Image (cartoon, grey):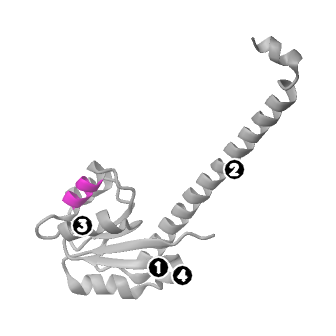
């Protein structure tokens, strides 16, 4: 079963949020829930309660900016894929955002195709991560079953039981 993802768009500019929300065919990417926030404080509340998997984040906003939000998310150890956006080519902000785990940093205005490509990449990585977890679970269960079969075969008789004592 394919997992469904939740996403939040955080930007102080309403037009920028609407552009991001309307430019992509979200269902195609298995993104079924979309949220928006106009600042880092509102975003943090949404993230705490709704736990989105992906965030498109404007780095420069009044109040709690994108970098401060990323720092807080790192402190709280949230697992969220982040696309950083900025209308400024401020290397310091971009560098700090990347240090804090931003998956990709894009400059505004972002082209639809570029944003879609990054979102597809993130969705692919999350799907692989989920499949990897399922495979590990199957391998673990197989290993447990083999161990149980071995124990049943080799330690069931009284002869082997006395050897263990």
Q: First in sequence, mark 3 or 1: give its number.
A: 1
- What label sits on residue 89 in the rendered view? none
- Circle 3 crowding by C-alpha within 10 Å: few under 14, some 14–19, many from 20: few
- Residue 58 seen in this snapshot: no
- Circle 1 crowding by C-alpha within 10 Å: few under 14, some 14–19, many from 20: few
| Number of the front mark, 2 or 4 | 2
Residue of label 1? 32
Q: Element at badge 3? A: helix
Residue of label 4? 28
**Where is residue 146 drawn, in percent x and y?**
78, 38
- Circle 2 crowding by C-alpha within 10 Å: few under 14, some 14–19, many from 20: few
Residue of label 3? 45
**Where is residue 158 drawn, in percent x and y?**
87, 18
Q: First in sequence, mark 4 or 3: give its number.
A: 4
Q: First in sequence, mark 1 or 2: give its number.
A: 1
**Where is residue 165 drawn, in percent x and y?**
75, 11
Residue 44: image quadrant is bottom left
Q: Quadrant of the N terminus?
A: bottom right
Q: Are marks 3 and 1 in contact (CB under 8 Å)?
A: no
Q: Is 113 or 62 nearer to us in this picture?
A: 62
Could you tell me which residue is drawn at 38 percent across and 79 percent down? 34
Q: Are marks 4 and 3 in contact (CB under 8 Å)?
A: no
Real-space CA distance between mark 1 and mark 4, rounded to the nearest whole angstrom: 9 Å
Q: Element at badge 4? A: helix
Considering only vertical position in the picture, is 43 above or below 98?
A: below
**Where is residue 67 drawn, in percent x and y?**
22, 59
Considering only vertical position in the picture, is 130 above or below 143?
A: below
Could you tell me which residue is drawn at 28 percent across and 82 percent down? 17
Could you tell me which residue is drawn at 20 percent across and 81 percent down? 13
């Amino acid at each position: 079963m394919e997992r469904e993802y939740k996403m939040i768009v955080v930007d102080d500019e309403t037009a920028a949020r609407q552009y991001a929300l309307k430019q992509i065919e979200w269902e195609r990417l298995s993104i079924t829930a979309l949220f928006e926030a106009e600042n880092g404080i509102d975003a943090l509340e949404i993230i705490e309660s709704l736990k989105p998997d992906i965030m498109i984040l404007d780095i420069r906003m009044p109040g709690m900016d994108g970098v401060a939000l990323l720092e807080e998310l790192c402190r709280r150890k949230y697992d969220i894929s982040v696309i950083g956006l900025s209308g400024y080519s401020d290397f310091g902000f971009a560098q700090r955002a990347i240090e804090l785990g931003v998956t990709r940093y894009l400059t505004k205005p972002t082209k639809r195709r570029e944003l879609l490509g990054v979102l597809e990449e993130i969705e692919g990585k999350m799907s692989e991560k989920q499949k990897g977890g399922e495979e590990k679970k199957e391998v673990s269960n197989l290993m447990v079953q083999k161990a149980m079969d071995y124990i049943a075969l080799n330690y069931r008789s009284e002869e082997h039981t006395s050897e263990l004592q």
